[in-house]
Amino acid sequence: MNDRTGGRAAFVVGAGILISRLVGVLRNTAFAYFFGAGAASDAYNAAFKIPNAVRNLLGEGTLSASFVPVYSRLLEREDPRAARALANAMLGMLLAAVSVLTLLGILLAPWLTTVLAPGFDGATRDLTTRLTRILFPMTGVMVLSGWCLGIQNSHRRFFWSYASAALWSVAQIALLLVGGPRADSATTLAVWLAWATLAGALLQVGAQMPEVLRLTGPLRPTLDRGAEGLLQTLRNVVPVVTALGVVQISSFIDLQIASFLPEGATTNMNYANTLALLPVSLFGVSVAAAALPELARDSGADATDVLRERLRSGWQRILFYIVPSAVVFIALGDYCVGILYRAGRFGAAEQQVVHWILAAFAVGLVSFGSVKLMASAYYALQDYRTPLRASMISIVVSAVASIAIAVPLRHSPLATAGIALGSALGSYVNLTVLLGGLRQRLGPLYTPAMWMGTRRIVVASLLATAVSFVARWAHMYWLPTLHPRLAGIPVLAVFGVVYLTTAWWMGSAEAARWLRRGVRHRAS
């Protein structure tokens, strides 16, 4: 797969993720309108995090790293029977594992709540336990969705595997719009939303099944340990799950710290995290997801030069989008938060707090996005230990930094920003370890040409910020009472136009591609 083809594949993945993420942002907008930031929203977000951790451990992340490389090689060998046998055996193993874990999660919900959110008071803790029991069956459904995604990506079917996640959010939006005005309390609405979240997971899997069945034929889940590639996949699963488990431990530590902070801390962190992860998902995950099957297909040969060039190209593409996103979140993040959330129970005070948290997350945006691509290179090379070691080191740094910053500020609404900043610092440690290992294997990744490209990106971002601040000043001087949704969109549009045109003028090929798309669109 050449650079142009890789760019197209990444664009298709990004388009699918964009749809699902935008609908997810609308879901959060509706959530903020009806819940704001309080005890019920904290309980829902905490309850969702617990089963979602199991989903992350056994779902799309694990399958992309462990199953896709092996399954892709069988497809490349043109052995559909062996590929189908592996797919069915992996499905059977996953269903057996999540069935047991789901039952345990429902039974142990009170204990899980006490351990993971020890700072919640009695009523909030009871509600969290109730919601956890409703949401835990979602784990098995979403793991099945991850298996579907692995099948589709291995067959180079990228768009719908990611876009189908929008249906999960649509179910929740529909519930909030219909049930929000009718619920007699935030607690009642949280329970209704939990059931809608489970229903949305079923919709997501149902939407993927027709294409999966066309690719694999009838589903026949088995526990056939003799299926070719299964033992290798399971061997790969262990270090991947361990590495992802370390990441989940980090998120649980964040939850534990937030549970001791002022009411609404868990919810505000979720609002900011959703925004911060949008560019990471669109650009970091899309490039990594598109590259992984091809990296796996090429890894059998001596393809060091090809791998190195693909990493360089993908990394430069990620930086083109991630760097300006980080600058926007830091300098103009209050507009981003206001556009999406400022309505209903979410007011000016919540907007300011979430902006601080978003800015703290933005400090680590470059590393959050880059780690995805670097880890994919290790997975394609069948090296799962280095990403695990990097994750373990980063969690220690993240936990220590989060506690050191947030605990002294625990009585302030801004304490949650300390948790986000700790996560950012830990992520840079993760990236540093991954880059060190790749440098030893592949040689230097960051070239003088890339440095010139990065300098171009930074200069364009800073110039766009300066011009945007003129537009911001005009808003504050002439129309200070204008709603952020009306004022923010033009200011952010100015940033985008100035950034693209400046980057293009300085010689950016990625900016030129966007401008050519705009010209073609107007011509059509």
Image (cartoon, helix red, strand yellow):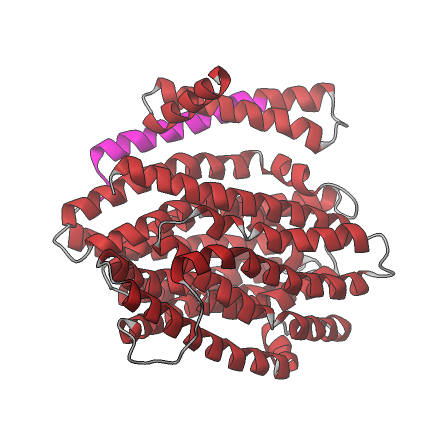
Q: Is residue 160 left or right of residue 150?
A: right
Quarter of image, res 75: bottom left
Judge whether residue 280 can be spotted in this image.
yes
In this view, the residue in front, 224 or 338, is 224
Q: Where residue 407 sits in the image (x, y, percent)?
A: 58, 62
Residue at the spot 58% in from the left edge and 34% down from the top edge: 332
Which residue is located at x 19 percent, y 51 percent? 439
Q: Indicate left or right for 76 with 503 as reference.
A: left
135 vs 86, nearest the viewer: 86
- In the rendered image, residue 320, in percent from the top left (x then y), is placed at 38, 34
Which range of residues does the magenta coloring cover? 444-469
Q: In the orientation shown, which residue stands out farthest toward the left?
A: 302
Q: Position of residue 400 (x, y in %)?
A: 46, 64
Quarter holding residue 241: bottom left
Asked where in the image residue 380 lies, by quadrant, the reply is bottom left
- Residue 363 visible in the displayed image: no
Residue 430 lies, with reference to residue 384, above or below; the image says above
* Image quarter of the N terminus: top left
Q: With respect to residue 329, does 116 lie above or below?
A: below
State the residue in front, 413 or 431. Answer: 431
x and y, in percent, of residue 202 in the image? 60, 63
As for residue 516 lying within the magenta part, the answer is no
In percent of the image, x 24 and y 56: which residue is there? 76
